[in-house]
Amino acid sequence: MQNASGDYHFKSISQLMRFLDYPMPPHPLVALVNYQQVPMAVFEKGKKISLDFYKISFKDKFNGQVRYGQGYYDFEDGGLAFLKPNQIVISSDLPESNEGYVLYFHPDLIRNYRLAHAIDQYGFFSYDVSEALFLSAKEKETISGLFHTIANELENNIDQFSQDVLVSQLELLLNYSNRFYNRQFITRKNVNHEIIDKLDQLLETYFNEKNGITMGLPSVKYASMELKLSQRYLSDMLRSLTGYNTQQYIQDKVIEHSKKILSSTLLSVAEVAYQLGFEHPQSFSKLFKVKTTLSPLAFRRSFEQ
């Protein structure tokens, strides 16, 4: 509910349903809501919204934008967006019209299932809303079918098998989402390669301006903030296209730049390490040897022969 600052926080699905003036769900740990049956102006614009449970939005059509931090997401053809518990979004300051469904499920729904231990593997729950999954027409049919299956199960009388069935259907929905996100990384190569180019330029500037001396090694957090992407999305996108996560990608760039310094200057190994942002020269030497099989000094000597 609203707190003193006017922001919204909901501890239970039932609490949210009451606020939306929506029928109470048959199962207290999961609810499926039709967007067309929810008042559009229910949340005060520009306020923060957070939930103690998961949310999966399936929007068949979407007009308008929803702000997340400094970004917006806007996809007229529809798609999927995911929120994990206590992730904050900001209600739209623009008029919206939605067609589709939103699925809410509480962590307790999956607590005694394998999915509870595996759900962190579905990295899209850590993506920003602006990094929503865009769906093709065929993919929308698949996702729509899954949502209708879940809806049918929720309309049945609850019995001893209900939770098992719901969790199985939920896991299938998440596995399809994983597949479709991987497809998105591949089919949007032009956009993603532009991001990689920007990352390369960002790191090159960082090294050339010797920011490592005052700021330390370039971090995953720094790169994602500068690129306005979530850390998990950036890492998953890089892994899909390059085989490396963000940390590994940055490390390769660090070593690549260190080779330039070692081969073109007389700086000591310790001076190179500190310029790059390492706190200890030994850490630099260890990483260099892991990446190249040579010590920094052995690499430099190879240019003297």
Image: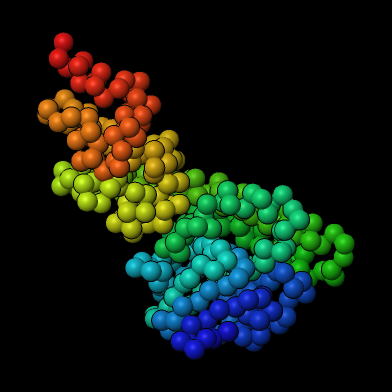
Q: Is residue 197 visible?
A: no
Determine which quarter of the picture holds residue 93: bottom left
Residue that lies at the very extreme toward the right in this rendered image: 160
Q: What color scheme is it?
A: rainbow
Q: Residue drawn at (16%, 10%), measured in percent from left and top?
A: 305
Q: Is residue 71 left or right of residue 203?
A: right
- Name the spot of residue 147 as percent of width and height, x first: 66, 62
Q: Residue drawn at (28%, 37%), measured in percent from left and top?
A: 254
Q: Would you place residue 118 above or below residue 263 in this image? A: below
- Name the spot of residue 179 as percent of width and height, x first: 55, 46
Residue that lies at the very extreme toward the left in this rendered image: 265
Q: In this orientation, which residue lies closer to the viewer: 302 or 85?
A: 302
Q: Would you place residue 58 above or below residue 233 in this image? A: below
Q: Is residue 242 left or right of residue 21?
A: left
Q: How many numbered circles are shown?
A: 0
Q: Residue drawn at (74%, 53%), measured in percent from left and top?
A: 113
Determine which quarter of the picture holds residue 244: top left
Q: In this orientation, which residue lies closer to the viewer: 192 or 127?
A: 127
Q: Is residue 231 left or right of residue 49?
A: left
Determine which quarter of the picture holds residue 196: top left
Split into 4 quadrants, where in the image is the N terminus?
Answer: bottom right
- Name the spot of residue 117 as percent of width and height, x first: 66, 50
